[in-house]
């Protein structure tokens, strides 16, 4: 477990704010999905600046978070309300600047600013100043500590909604010799952990000799060892659909998916250190992304190339020497794209194209032959889509969950934590 040292601040106005509660409130802003290449045109639709990560946008988000959370002393309320004069505006600006500096000093955020040169006699401070212009160009990014914290907060929220849960290694229904006494005893075999069941061993000796004397008359065949539940490790690839439908129709479905990925990462790192988690984005094609860049991942004007995502996930899992391998796929649309042998992308926006579906199911079958389970979390309930997902589950012997953005995390966490039943050969 990592520990962080926090610096001491002077008792200023901003110091009364609970920084971690504020960061939790800012999670939607910091993980916003937007559209990759904002402002581009796709099928006649214009995309705006939903992915704005400027310093100005951060300050506005902080202001809204403070108003929603009620983290105000009388002085803060006075600073926020003000009288609309220059002094009140300066006081509010100072408060927001100090909160941004605290988030940076604590290691949750960093800023990426391009060099700024004043034009002519442009003032350095105030409206229209070089500082004001620069704040629109500065990019706000989460640090590793910030990503880890948001993963922890999301995980806590999910666990709270599930009720009490004891964490440990993944359970299987198979027994092995170990320290914990979870099963019946078995005769000792070479290589077993010497977790001797004294009562059963003495019983065998007494049944063979008819008495118990000192020194004990024990033979190899008398030895009995206790068994413990066999604990397995798991390699997981989380496949996130980042096609354009994941943020259209008045609902952002991609940001909740990113939060689930951060929660899973925190869970695996702290409770299942033998497990691995990789993240794959699939759209017109597919690529693996580092967890450090997940917070800034965006959806785009893309189609859904499910087959390419499965192919990449299968390749990543092939290099993992784990007892169990699984793909967690989060999507809301029908496969609508396919990578052709010559590298070109075949697209059909209407979805459920016979060619695309056939190749996608072939890739599902390849995962099955590789011993990979596919659990699909579907964020839509179109009738034809339901039938396709059921077919995927039948082939891969996985499960299909039809959920929404509010319950997505709970379903995935319950699925990940429950007992695994696959026999390890």
Image (cartoon, rainbow, N blue to C red):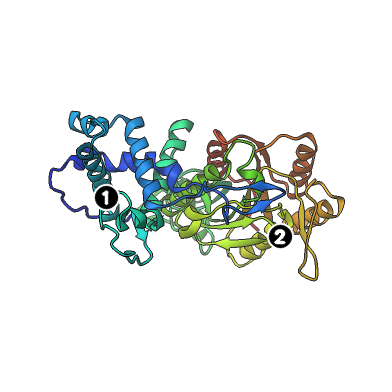
Identify the image quadrant of residue 311: bottom right
Q: Is residue 408 left or right of residue 29?
A: right
Q: Nearer the viewer, residue 58 or 212?
A: 58
Image quadrant for the N terminus?
bottom left
Estimate how packed mark 1 is, as few (under 14), some (14 to 19) or many (20 or more) residues with alpha carbons within 10 Å: few
Residue name at image x 48 percent, y 59 percent: 293
Where in the figure is residue 209, as x and y percent of width and height? 48, 51
Estimate how packed mark 2 is, as few (under 14), some (14 to 19) or many (20 or more) residues with alpha carbons within 10 Å: many
Q: Identify the residue under disc 2.
A: 308
**Label 2 close to label 1 by CB (< 8 Å):** no
Q: Is residue 238 left or right of residue 27?
A: right
Q: Which mark is residue 218?
A: none
Cα–Cα gap, marks 2 and 1: 51 Å
Looking at this view, name the residue that lies furthest to the bottom.
342
Q: Identify the residue under disc 1.
A: 126
Looking at this view, name the residue that lies furthest to the right.
354
Q: Is residue 61 visible?
A: yes
């Amino acid at each position: 477990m990592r520990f962080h040292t926090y610096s001491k601040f002077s008792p200023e106005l901003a110091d009364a704010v609970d920084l971690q509660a504020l960061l939790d409130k800012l999670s939607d802003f910091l993980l916003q999905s937007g559209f990759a290449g904002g402002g581009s045109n796709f099928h006649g639709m214009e995309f705006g600046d939903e992915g704005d990560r400027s310093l100005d946008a951060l300050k506005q988000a902080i202001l809204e978070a403070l108003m929603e959370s009620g983290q105000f002393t009388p002085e803060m309320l006075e600073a926020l309300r003000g009288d609309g004069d220059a002094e009140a505006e300066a006081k509010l600006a100072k408060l927001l600047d100090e909160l941004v500096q605290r988030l940076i000093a604590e290691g949750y955020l960093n800023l990426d600013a391009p060099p700024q040169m004043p034009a002519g006699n442009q003032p350095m401070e105030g409206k229209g100043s070089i500082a004001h212009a620069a704040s629109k160009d500065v990019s706000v990014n989460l640090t590793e500590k910030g990503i880890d914290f948001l993963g922890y907060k999301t995980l806590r929220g999910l666990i709270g909604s599930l009720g009490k849960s004891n964490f440990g290694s993944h359970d299987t229904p198979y027994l092995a010799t170990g320290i914990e006494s979870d099963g019946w005893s078995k005769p000792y075999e070479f290589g077993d952990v010497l977790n001797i069941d004294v009562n059963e061993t003495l019983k065998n000796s007494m049944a063979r000799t008819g008495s118990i004397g000192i020194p004990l008359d024990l033979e190899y065949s008398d030895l009995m060892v206790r068994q413990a539940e066999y604990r397995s490790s798991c390699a997981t690839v989380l496949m996130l659909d980042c096609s354009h439908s994941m943020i259209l129709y008045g609902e952002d479905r991609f940001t909740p998916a990113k939060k689930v990925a951060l929660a899973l990462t925190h869970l695996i790192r702290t409770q299942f250190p033998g497990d691995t988690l990789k993240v794959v984005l699939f759209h017109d094609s597919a690529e693996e992304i580092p967890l450090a860049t997940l917070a800034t991942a965006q959806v785009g004007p893309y189609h859904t190339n499910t087959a390419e995502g499965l192919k990449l996930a299968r390749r990543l899992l092939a290099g993992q020497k784990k007892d169990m391998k699984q793909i967690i796929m989060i999507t809301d649309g029908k496969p609508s794209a396919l990578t052709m042998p010559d590298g070109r992308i075949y697209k059909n926006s209407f979805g459920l194209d016979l060619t695309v579906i056939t190749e996608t199911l072939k890739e599902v079958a390849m995962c099955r032959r590789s011993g990979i389970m596919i659990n699909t979390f579907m964020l839509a309930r179109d009738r034809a889509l339901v039938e396709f997902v059921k077919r995927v589950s039948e082939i891969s012997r996985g499960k299909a969950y039809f959920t929404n953005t509010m319950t997505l995390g709970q379903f995935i966490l319950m699925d990940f934590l429950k007992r695994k039943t696959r026999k390890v050969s």
